[in-house]
Image (spheres, helix red, strand yellow):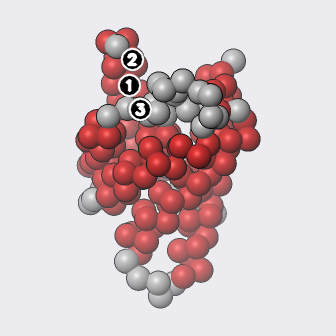
Amino acid sequence: MTIDLLQRVVAFVVLVVVQALVLNHIHLFGVATPLFYVYFVLLFRRNHPKWIILLTSFLLGLCIDVFSNTPGLAAASTTFIAVLQPYILEPFIPRDSDENLKPGMRTLGIGRFVYYTVFMVFLYNIVFFSLEAFNFFNWLQWLLCICGSTLLTVVLILVVENLRRS
């Protein structure tokens, strides 16, 4: 239990630092920014207490907001997907799996993990960029930001997950 908590705290700090110092400065074609910290929310275990998921996801988003100068965007978006994470994870879990299953390529399988990741990151980006734009006047730019950031974030998550698996 304490080792798992220590790993989560280290992952929290590393994700915030990497996002703030490196990934926030990447803007491919002016539309795609990797939002890698979403990976933290994706990896909550199956029967993790919901209040812990909500609280840590909100704190993660708040830390990202502080270092990224995006007042409330990341906090609201990470809290939104934290609310949905236990319910979205359930259809991707095999029927005869453990109650404390940790989502990953090894436990869910490659296909299910990719679909789960794409769906969660896409939902996150819809909320994040909708709150950022706060209008649909330039809907093409909004759509490009969502799709580009989703693609870049999913590729980064899959690469890191594949490296973790090895």
> Badge 2 local density, few (<14 within 10 Å), some, or many (20+)?
few
Quarter of the picture containing the N terminus is top left
Relative to 77, say whether 107 is above or below: above
N-term-proximal mark, 1 vs 3: 1
Q: Position of residue 108 (x, y in %)?
A: 65, 33
Kind of residue indicated by mark 1: Arg
Q: Position of residue 140 (x, y in %)?
A: 59, 80
Q: Residue at x 53, y 43 (%)?
A: 90
Q: Which residue matches tag 2?
A: 4
Relative to 69, say whether 104 is above or below: above
Quarter of the picture containing the C terminus is top right
Q: Residue at x 54, y 52 (%)?
A: 121
Kind of residue indicated by mark 2: Asp
Q: Which of the two discs, 3 and 2, sits closer to the camera?
A: 3
Q: Residue at x 54, y 24 (%)?
A: 98
Which of 101/22 is in front?
101
N-term-proximal mark, 3 vs 2: 2
> Badge 1 local density, few (<14 within 10 Å), some, or many (20+)?
some
Residue at the farthest bottom position: 137
Which of 128/84 is in front?
84
Q: Position of residue 97 (x, y in %)?
A: 59, 27
The answer to whether marks 1 and 3 mark residues whose Cβ atoms lie closer than 8 Å is: no
Q: Which mark is residue 47?
A: 3
Q: Which of the two discs, 1 and 2, sits closer to the camera?
A: 2
The answer to whether marks 1 and 2 mark residues whose Cβ atoms lie closer than 8 Å is: yes
